[in-house]
Amino acid sequence: MNENEVLTVTLTLENNEELECEVITIFEVQGQQYIALYPLSDEDGSVYLYRFIDHGDEEPGLENIEADVEFEAVSDAFNAWADAQDFGDIDLDDMD
């Protein structure tokens, strides 16, 4: 995969609707990996956070974050990561 290629994941929602999402990043909080996903069809800026389970040679798995304390820690870590990114150098005119 080259650096300009977008990695996507297709989520199947509770109503069996499929939602294609761009992988923003995979990051670690307290020894557990998490993934941040951005729906390609979403225009309101929602980001979905899940536990990321690496099964080695098999396809990785995603788990919902059920506990409020865990979700808050993961959300804080993602927000810190996003704040540290240098999005200021992106020329939006080059993205056409």
Image: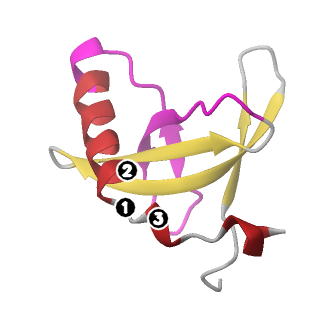
Position above or below: 84 against 12: below
- Quarter of image, res 16: top right
- Quarter of image, res 13: top right
Mark drawn on residue 85: 1
Q: Residue at x 63, y 71 (%)?
A: 91
Residue 56 visible somewhere in the drawing: no
Secondary structure category for the residue under label 1? loop
Point out the tag, 2 or 3, that comes first from the N-terminus.
Answer: 2
Residue 44 visible somewhere in the drawing: yes
Mark drawn on residue 50: none
Image location (x, y in percent) of residue 29: 21, 45
Mark 2–mark 1 CB contact (< 8 Å): yes
Image location (x, y in percent) of residue 9: 68, 50
Position above or below: 57 against 11: below
Amino acid carrying mark 2 in the image: Ala
Q: Is residue 14 left or right of residue 74?
A: right
Amino acid carrying mark 3 in the image: Gly
The verdict on residue 51 being magenta is: yes
- Quarter of image, res 20: top right
Category of crowding for the residue at label 3, using alpha-carbon neighbours closer than 10 angstroms: few (below 14), some (14–19), many (at least 20) = few
Q: Which residues are magenta?
A: 42-70
Q: Is residue 47 left or right of residue 82?
A: right
Q: Marks 2/1: CA distance?
A: 5 Å
Q: Residue at x 71, y 16 (%)?
A: 14
Category of crowding for the residue at label 1, using alpha-carbon neighbours closer than 10 angstroms: few (below 14), some (14–19), many (at least 20) = few
Secondary structure category for the residue under label 3? helix
Secondary structure category for the residue under label 2? helix
Q: Which residue is mark 3?
A: 88
Q: Which residue is mark 2?
A: 82
Position above or below: 56 against 45: below
Q: Residue at x 76, y 44 (%)?
A: 40
